[in-house]
Amino acid sequence: MRVVLATHNQHKVDEFQKILGARLPELEIVKYEGPEPIEDGVTFAENSLIKARAAARHTGLPALADDSGIAVDILGGSPGIFSARWAGHGRGDQANRELLLDQLADIHDDQRGAAFVCHIAVVVPAGAPGDATAGDAAAADIAWEDVASGFWRGSLTREPRGANGFGYDPVFVPSGLDVTAAELSPEEKNAISHRALAFENVIPLLRMNVIPK
């Protein structure tokens, strides 16, 4: 059963295959080879749906897409969908972290709550699951769609710690732990992260609406 992942990143495809394939061995996750849509949604869920709809319509296959970032309580949920470019387009992870910590420099420790957020959209085009080749379903209607989410609560440090992970991991301490996400091993992080929780929530959606009965 082929499902297209709305990304051009083969590493992400391999990650989805490893995690979902362990629970749903009938799934084959394939990379999206079509044009990238404009992500003009105002929430993680909207942007994940925009990407998944584009992949489903272009390929005629059921599609997955994820969108994620960090939401800081005292900033009203920002950086949110702007997490990857908080310091400006092309500035990178370090600049994003430095700006965020600078904005929170005077905020007390008990007010530095935050959460990593991940939404995974599942979109099924009319006629799927199928054997449509790429491009045959450019105008396909959407038969069904939904979004699974995962939230990883924690708080923000005052200085980066740890060499693992990426993005905001070095400044995020998960609730119940005294180490940052970047001080966890990849295996430890992948077992409890926002993405892990979203994967758990997307599996029932796939079983009920994508995997042939």
Image (tube, grey):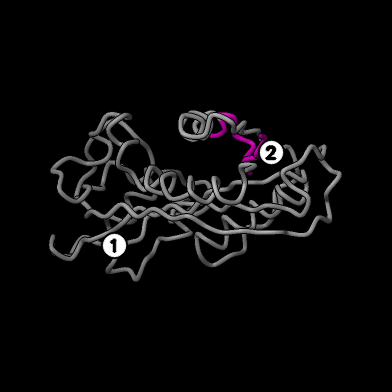
Circle 1: residue type: Gln
Left or right side of 83 for 168: left
Residue at 60%, 51% in the rendered image: 209
Q: Quadrant of the N terminus?
A: top right
| Quadrant hosting residue 181 | top left
Secondary element under disc 1, as helix, strand or loop, is helix
- Give coordinates of residue 3: x percent, y percent: 65, 39
| Residue 34 percent coordinates (x, y) | 75, 42
109 vs 144, nearest the viewer: 144
Of 71 and 120, nearer the camera is 120
Residue 51 placement, left or right of 89: right
Q: Nearer the viewer, residue 187 or 202?
A: 202
For marks 1 and 2 on the same chain, the one whose residue lies earlier in the sequence = 2
At x 54%, y 45%, the residue is 207
Discs 1/2, front: 2
Q: Which residue is mark 1?
A: 103
Q: What residue did someone put label 2 on? A: 32
The amino acid marked with disc number 2 is: Tyr
Q: Position of residue 208 (x, y in %)?
A: 56, 50
Judge whether residue 6 is colored magenta: yes
